[in-house]
Image (spheres, rainbow, N blue to C red):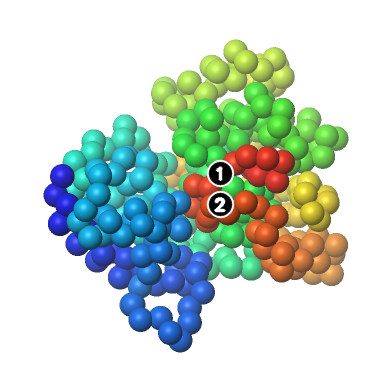
Amino acid sequence: MNHSELAAFLKSRRDRVRPADAGLPTGPRRRVPGLRREEVAQLAGLSADYYTELERGRGAQPSGQVLAALARALRLSGDERDHLFHLAERPLPAAAHGPAAHPQPALLGLLDRLTTTPARIITDLHETLAQNALAVALLGPAPLGRGLDGSFAYRWFTDPAARALHPAEDHPHHSRVFAADLQAVAARRARDADVTRMVAALRRHSEEFAALWEQRDVALRRTERKRIVHPSLGVIELDCHNLFSEDGRQRLLWFSAPPGTEGAAQLELLSVIGTQDLAPGGDRLGTGPADGPAHRHR
């Protein structure tokens, strides 16, 4: 592994990212043009000591998971991310070249500017790629990894705990919406291995999904009213908006409420209490832990 080149590349990218772009506060005493080392470590879910050793050209060879987390924290482009893997002498993940493997820069730029409302970027299979602090406060940290375990749509039908995010009387509606949404995705991504694998697993493990799939209803999720069960604020009624990437493989979700409504007041309160109900480590990139009733997933 080329320790010195990896260290120099990490530092050059760190200097380029403004704190505001990463959702971090700025202050008059900041001495560096970009992020501090400890801020990169926080965003990537790493210890400050470990990241410091990387930037000093020392330490063990970072794993692919660590490199992917650093690529997200440092806002690397696809080419820059691949370069990071090459410097660390790690093979590119099988999905690294796919459009859903890394948050698209346009959506990530918009997410960085949504500081007063919960927002996150997901794939069309409902895997979380990035989220802001208010999304963590509202929905809980996102799970690690991609694939079946990283998909909220898959967990909705296979893990009863995932449904605690919404009131029980709303569950049938969400089931229908998820199935109809996946029908549209499966048609658009015909013969795609990831989609085929997920649909087959859902039909095998969930009788409810199998029955809904046979109805062949089709409708992409766009804007809808949702009720979310929050551990401190109770049931919050919000509008969920979806902005699709040009290829349809990623979506920026954000939540809002009409002015003067109870939902708007609850969002204001959410911005005050922030993530104090959540354990440390759940950052905007969705790499924090996901244990306990407060750590629910979208």
Give residue 234's position: percent from left, percent from top.
Answer: 83, 51
State the quadrant of the N terminus: top left
Which amino acid type corresponds to the residue marked 2 in the rendered image?
Gly
Q: Residue at x 54, y 17 (%)?
A: 200
Q: Can residue 75 be seen in the rendering of this structure?
A: no
Give residue 77's position: percent from left, percent from top.
Answer: 31, 55
Which amino acid type corresponds to the residue marked 1 in the rendered image?
Pro
State the quadrant of the C terminus: top right
Image-quadrant location for residue 115? bottom right
Q: Is residue 21 left or right of residue 60?
A: right
Q: Residue at x 84, y 69 (%)?
A: 260
| Mark 1 / mark 2, whichever is N-terminal | 2
Q: Is residue 103 left or right of residue 256?
A: left
Check disc 1 and report its element: helix, strand or loop.
loop
Q: Can residue 290 be seen in the rendering of this structure?
A: yes
Q: CA distance from mark 1 to mark 2?
A: 6 Å
Q: Nearer the viewer, residue 18 or 65?
A: 65
| Contact (Cβ within 8 Å) of mark 1 with mark 2 | yes
Checking the image for residue 282, the label placed there is 2
Image-quadrant location for residue 57? bottom left
Q: Is residue 56 left or right of residue 51?
A: left
Checking the image for residue 83, the label placed there is none
Considering every residue shown, the one lying at the far bottom of the view is 28
Q: Is residue 23 left or right of residue 48?
A: right
Check disc 2 and report its element: helix, strand or loop.
loop
Residue hosting label 1: 289
Q: Residue at x 66, y 49 (%)?
A: 139
Q: Nearer the viewer, residue 136 or 53?
A: 53
